[in-house]
Image: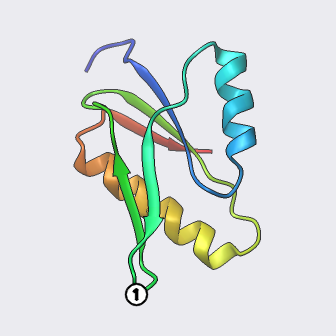
Amino acid sequence: MELFMELKLFSGSTHPQLAKAIAAELGIPLGAVELGHFPGGETFVKCTEQIRDADVFIVQPTCCPPNESIMELLIMLDAARRASCGRITAV
């Protein structure tokens, strides 16, 4: 594993303003991700950029409503892992 991996920052739907502020402070662009819901209400997440071997940070506070926020975070973590990122950190 490389010592310095490419840093990618993604935001869930709970607090995108926080993720934008963090990205601005770090001087990096916010990663592109598609968030939505299937007709049955299930959460849909798709990373629309290459994150293989990257150091991925996902900003998703678990505030109201906590059940939906946590589920979205877990699905985002799963999507990042399936995209073969190097390391994932939930913020």
Residue at mark 1: 40
Left or right: residue 15 versus residue 12 is right
Left or right: residue 16 versus residue 78 is right
Q: Amino acid at mark 1?
A: Gly
Indicate the position of residue 72 as horizontal and vertical percent values.
51, 65
Indicate the position of residue 8 as horizontal and vertical percent values.
46, 28
Residue at 24 percent across and 31 percent down: it is 52
Identify whether 44 is placed above or below 59. Answer: below
Left or right: residue 61 versus residue 70 is right
Residue at 74 percent across and 40 percent down: it is 18
Mark 1 crowd level (few <14, some 14–19, many ≥20, 10 Å Cα):
few
Residue at 39 percent across and 65 percent down: it is 44
- Direction bottom: furthest residue: 40
Query: Total marks drawn?
Result: 1
Residue at 41 percent across and 54 percent down: it is 77
Secondary structure, mark 1, is loop
Indicate the position of residue 21 as horizontal and vertical percent values.
74, 29
